[in-house]
Image (cartoon, helix red, strand yellow):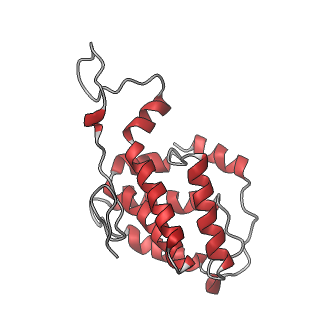
Amino acid sequence: MRAAIGGTALATGWANTADISRTRPRTGCRKGLNIPVATNSELVEAVFEDRVVTVAELAEWSLAMDDAWEGFVVFITGVCELQAADLGYNDLAIRGGTAGTDTGYALMRQIIERAQESGALRDDVTLEDMAFVIWGVAATVRATFRVAPGVWRWHLALTLDGLHVTAAHPLPTPPMPPSQTRTAMNDCP
């Protein structure tokens, strides 16, 4: 499936490249990326703003798909494609920095619930579980980008197979609650 919204199309049709040309450089800075921000989180938001917009567009597009499971897969794959195309964004994902906004969480929750209601996604999958999916693929991208840049797709396919209802078996522990997931994301090296 190919489509593009505001950027270069990848396999699922989703990716934007950073356009920092719109930012105003600070005077007096000698070199590097000069974006006027007060905090590190504002800097991250400014640099990766296009990714946040792309992920939101991808989520809305996925929700509009007729097949809820396909929408779920397209969304997760699109997010992982963004990670694979941009190691800076990938590293941010490893550190939990792409958690996004309340709107992003709400859209992802809708994608999960819709896939569960269709009977395709395991009932015990939570929004917080998606952090582990993203972290796992992010680590694979980082470890293999030089020797096998596309192997993250194999990792993701195995993960998606395990998330499908037909592969469901009782899980050994309950999911982490949102507060523990946030703590883990914030403590990630």
Q: Position of residue 65 (x, y in %)?
A: 50, 75
> In the drawing, does residue 57 fall left or right of residue 174?
left
Q: Position of residue 127 (x, y in %)?
A: 64, 60
Q: Is residue 143 visible?
A: no
Marks counted in the figure total 0
Q: Which residue lies at the image location 45% right of the left edge and 45% below the top edge?
A: 92
Q: Residue furthest top?
A: 28
Q: Position of residue 103 (x, y in %)?
A: 58, 50
Residue 48 figure quarter: top left
Q: Nearer the viewer, residue 99 or 183?
A: 99
Against 91, is 30 above or below?
Answer: above
Against 72, is 34 above or below?
Answer: above
Residue 23 figure quarter: top left
User: Can you say which quadrant of the picture contains the N terminus?
Assistant: bottom left
Q: Nearer the viewer, residue 70 or 134?
A: 70
Q: Which residue lies at the image location 39% right of the left edge and 56% below the top edge?
A: 83
Against 78, is 38 above or below?
Answer: above
Q: Which residue lies at the image location 32% right of the left edge and 53% below the top edge?
A: 16
> In the drawing, does residue 188 fall left or right of residue 144?
right
